[in-house]
């Protein structure tokens, strides 16, 4: 009997230790989690019809610079500023992942292109996530907006962010959290468009070099990958065209043998329409490829950039949403 009792006690403590081990791994994974490619950036404050999505992320060869592509849709380009220096940046870290020595930069590749965020950490990056807020400080307005008395000053914006982030120190079920959440939700709607992106440099693709200028950065971050994607699309379209033309040849041969073959006639009409559509798609893709391939990218093409930011440190970064 004592043997079974000891075995039971052993299994109990072994199971408890295993559960704790798995919980620790899960907590580490949550802290290290980041947004994924093409994920939409949440609009944390303000209102906007435009959408921003996370594009490619790259980590420099020395592991000290994280480059991030922020993709704008057409509505975002209409509603948000196209100049990097008209945005405000806010960096949110934790006590266990201090980034007080980090340097941030935000610029936009052309007036209708992607935003490029860089985060430089002289000591490299821990395998933990952090948050960067991107605030449209340009605040493009309509005539109706000019009559709105709820426009917030820069000081009001920072006070609102500080108050909201303070909630990250409490659990979602705490009395302190619930007592202020309604007021903060109201203040958040008054903010200018404020998006945030959650990042972890360890989840980015590793680059083969360090960047010395904007041209190298943009080429490595998304131009090369876009060229590869367009080239792949052209190859796929070419294969489809080859198969379609082979089918068309078959239908022509059938009709030459029997001009009353209705199945062949219908097939011929359908495949000719498909060939025309595929050829149009190929031509369009080819033009995009050649235009991108021949574009000369200046070494300072992302200017004017925003390089100033304010740092916030919270206890629980997972409470920010």
Image (spheres, grey):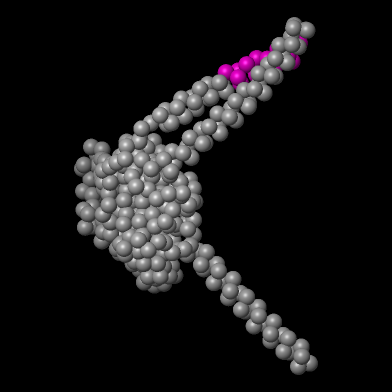
Using the image, determine if residue 26 lies above or below residue 49. Answer: below
Using the image, determine if residue 170 lies above or below residue 145. Answer: below
Q: Is residue 285 magenta?
A: no
Q: Which residue lies at the image location 42% right of the left edge and 57% below the top edge?
A: 63
Foreground residue among 290 and 150 = 290
Chief SS of the magenta region = helix
Q: Is residue 264 magenta?
A: yes
Residue 236: give x, y in percent of width and height: 60, 30
Question: Which residues are the magenta region?
Answer: 261-276
Q: Which residue lies at the image location 58% right of the left edge and 74% below the top edge?
A: 21
Q: Which residue lies at the image location 42% right of the left edge and 61% below the top edge?
A: 125
Relative to 182, 6 lies left or right: right
Residue 138 in sight from this viewpoint: yes
Residue 272: give x, y in percent of width and height: 62, 16
Counting every numbered tag in the picture gives 0
* Quarter in which the N terminus is drawn: bottom right
Q: Which residue lies at the image location 36% right of the left edge and 67% below the top edge?
A: 98
């Amino acid at each position: 009997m004592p043997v079974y009792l000891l075995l039971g006690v052993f299994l109990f403590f072994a199971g408890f230790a295993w559960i704790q081990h798995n919980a620790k791994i899960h907590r580490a994974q949550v802290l290290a989690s980041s947004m994924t490619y093409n994920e939409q950036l949440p609009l944390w404050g303000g209102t906007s019809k435009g959408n921003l999505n996370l594009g490619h992320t790259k980590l420099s060869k020395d592991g000290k610079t994280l480059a991030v592509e922020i993709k704008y849709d057409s509505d975002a380009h209409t509603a948000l500023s196209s100049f990097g220096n008209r945005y405000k940046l806010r960096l949110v870290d934790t006590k266990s992942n201090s980034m007080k020595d980090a340097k941030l930069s935000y610029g936009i590749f052309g007036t209708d292109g992607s935003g490029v965020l860089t985060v430089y950490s002289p000591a490299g990056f821990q395998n933990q996530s952090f948050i960067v807020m991107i605030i449209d400080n340009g605040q493009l307005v309509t005539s109706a907006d000019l009559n709105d008395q709820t426009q917030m000053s820069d000081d009001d914006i920072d006070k609102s962010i500080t108050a909201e982030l303070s909630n990250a120190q409490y659990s979602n079920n705490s009395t302190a959290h619930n007592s202020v959440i309604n007021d903060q939700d109201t203040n958040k709607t008054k903010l200018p468009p404020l998006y945030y992106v959650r990042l972890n440099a360890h989840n980015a693709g590793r680059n083969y070099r360090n960047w010395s200028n904007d041209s190298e950065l943009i080429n490595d971050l998304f131009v090369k990958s876009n060229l590869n994607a367009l080239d792949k699309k052209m190859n796929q379209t070419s294969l489809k065209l080859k198969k379609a033309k082979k089918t068309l040849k078959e239908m022509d041969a059938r009709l030459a043998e029997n001009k009353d073959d209705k199945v062949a006639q219908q097939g011929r009409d359908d495949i000719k329409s498909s060939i025309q559509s595929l050829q149009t798609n190929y031509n369009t893709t080819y033009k995009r490829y050649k235009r991108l391939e021949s574009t000369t990218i200046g070494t300072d093409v992302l200017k004017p950039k925003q390089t100033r930011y304010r740092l916030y440190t919270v206890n629980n970064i997972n409470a920010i949403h």
